[in-house]
Amino acid sequence: MIQLKSPREIEVMAAGGRILGATHRHIQSAIAPGISTGELDAMVEAFIRGQGAVPSFKGLYGFPASACISINDEIVHGIPSPTRILRAGDIVTVDIGVHHGGFHTDSAWTYAVDAIPPETQRLLDVTERSLHAGIAAATLGNHIGDIGHAVEEVVVRAGYTVVRDLVGHGVGTSMHEEPQVPNHGKPKRGPKLQAGMTIAIEPMVNVGGAATKTLADKWTIVTLDGALSAHFEHTIAITADGPRILTTLG
Ligand code: MG
Ligand code: MG
């Protein structure tokens, strides 16, 4: 069942989302060659708790850390570690959830580590653009399929592929609620969008093929062909005035 949120509940989620956006800003300046993903995770946890909120992912389904941190061909769910060191030219996705006032918000961003090649920057730009195309399609009268259709159109036109094994989702008192929000779809298909729906839209875009595999750690999901992948995610509310981004990066 899709849980609709009241305007008051959406304001609570927006407050959590501001903490989440500020967390991204906080770690962005630390992303540089030589830092470990374990150090970044510790920064994420300390910052969120310092705001009086709780990192949603810690312990969720047994996940051992506060942020999912995924490097290069890793798509999602990378486990932070003191021995995973960022190098110049890497791209690193930091996916963070915040639990605040009884509600979760969810936002991921792929960052460049120092200078990256222009073709890698293009992957980041296209993925971010596909997220915003998906958000723009999240209007009353549209359906979930319109969002995925808008995302995929941007990605395919750029010559990349969208991951189909993983999807966006409703978000609220639980981190993962109905409906699923795929990054592909057909216009006017799927659940109809209603005011008060809060969803995480999160395109995962691959330079190569769309196929994925899960590593032996049972968490990290990588591209099967080893090519680069990027991931941008916002939690949004669907309102009569249009889509509202709740996890703005400030
Ligand atoms: Mg996320
Ligand atoms: Mg998500």
Image: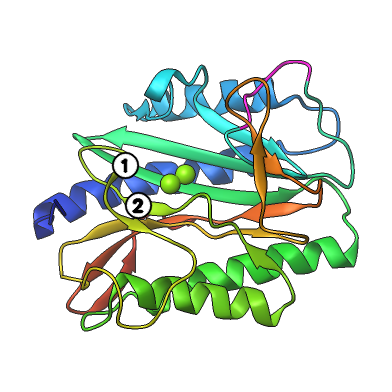
- Quadrant of the rendered image containing residue 59: top left
Whether residue 45 sits left or right of residue 60 in the image: it is right
Q: Identify the residue position indicated by label 2 in the image.
A: 169
Of residues 52 and 189, the one nearer the viewer is: 189
Task: Verify CB contact (< 8 Å) between mark 1 and mark 2.
Answer: yes
Using the image, tell me which numbered label, if any, was put on residue 235: none
Of residues 18 and 119, the one nearer the viewer is: 119
- What are the residue bounds of the magenta stretch? 78-83
Quick one: label 2, few (<14), some, or many (20+) residues within 10 Å? many
Residue 22, position as x, y percentages in the image: 48, 44
Can residue 59 be seen?
no
Of residues 104 and 212, the one nearer the viewer is: 212
Q: Residue at x 73, y 59 (%)?
A: 209
Residue 111, position as x, y percentages in the image: 70, 50
Distance from mark 1 CB to nearest ligand 2 atom below 8 Å:
yes
Of residues 98 and 162, the one nearer the viewer is: 162
Residue type at tag 1? His
Secondary element at tag 1: loop
Q: Identify the residue position indicated by label 1 in the image.
A: 176
Distance from mark 2 CB to nearest ligand 2 atom below 8 Å:
yes
Tell whether position 80 is magenta: yes
Q: Which residue is drawn at 52% across and 73% down?
A: 151
